[in-house]
């Protein structure tokens, strides 16, 4: 029986890799399937461009760029945590809200190992990235450019870890601990372990715990 629980449509709890069609339109359906390497081709050049621009045009030192980029990585990790916990696991009351949330995240809980639905559609990710860049630049001016690069680095690392968690057959050091934690989020308790790349914010906000 299908139900909405913690903002996620529950129809399956097994480790499925097959999927379901979301749209009648072939055109719309095509946009829901994205190769897992797409973010790296899309945002990798942007990351390099931001660092280069900050260095050559605004003359930031290597240390300044490193510190700002590291700050951006931390901002990403916090953004990742709250986006997953607050937005993706929000419990909408309207059918429209339930539909949107299922498209964003519920389908991933139903089909966690479907490789071409692990990343966000490119149009959506570009829109969000543009907004985040604008916020960085409006608040910090030129310093927001290398910080945004760090934010992108955090996002790309997230995509790497998330793909490894669901599809890599090799145990890769740090990602193995996160794999176990993330799979517990999927198959044991969806109200805990929201951090994919790091348990830091789960520890801070008390969401890294076993289901009682």
Image (tube, rainbow, N blue to C red):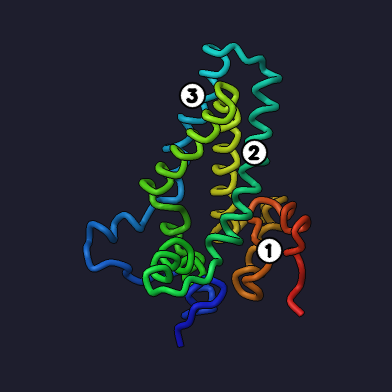
Question: Horizontal and vertical percent for residue 91?
Answer: 52, 71
Q: Residues within 10 Å of mark 3 (few under 14, many from 20)?
A: some
- Per the rendering, the mark at residue 49 is 3
| Marks 3/2: CA–CA distance | 17 Å
- Counting residues from the start of the chain, the first of labels 1 and 2 encountered is 2
Q: How many callouts does the rendering have?
A: 3
Q: Which residue is mark 2?
A: 73
Q: Secondary structure at mark 3?
A: helix
- Of residue 187 and residue 126, the one placed in the foreground of this image is 126
Q: Residue at x 50, y 65 (%)?
A: 113
Q: Secondary structure at mark 2?
A: helix
Question: Horizontal and vertical percent for residue 72?
Answer: 63, 35
Q: Residue at x 77, y 68 (%)?
A: 209
Q: Which residue is mark 1?
A: 193
| Marks 1/2: CA–CA distance | 19 Å
Question: Horizontal and vertical percent for residue 5?
Answer: 54, 77
- Counting residues from the start of the chain, the first of labels 1 and 3 encountered is 3
């Amino acid at each position: 029986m299908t139900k909405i629980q913690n903002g996620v449509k529950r129809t399956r709890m097994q480790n499925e890799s097959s999927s379901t069609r979301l749209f009648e339109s072939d055109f719309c359906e095509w946009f829901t399937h994205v190769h897992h390497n797409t973010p790296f081709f899309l945002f990798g050049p942007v990351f390099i461009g931001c660092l280069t621009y900050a260095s050559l045009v605004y003359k930031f030192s290597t240390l300044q760029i490193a510190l700002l980029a590291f700050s951006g990585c931390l901002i990403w990790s916090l953004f990742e945590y709250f986006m997953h916990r607050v937005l993706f696991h929000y419990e909408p009351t309207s059918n429209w809200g339930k539909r949107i949330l299922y498209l964003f995240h519920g389908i991933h809980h139903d089909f966690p190992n479907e490789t071409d639905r692990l990343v966000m559609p490119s149009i959506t990710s570009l829109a969000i990235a543009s907004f985040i860049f604008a916020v960085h630049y409006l608040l910090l001016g030129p310093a927001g450019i290398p910080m945004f690069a760090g934010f992108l680095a955090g996002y790309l690392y997230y995509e790497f870890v998330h793909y490894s968690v669901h599809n890599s057959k090799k145990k890769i050091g740090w990602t193995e601990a996160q794999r176990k934690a993330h799979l517990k989020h999927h198959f044991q308790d969806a109200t805990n372990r929201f951090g994919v790349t790091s348990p830091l914010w789960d520890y801070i906000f008390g969401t890294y715990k076993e289901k009682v």
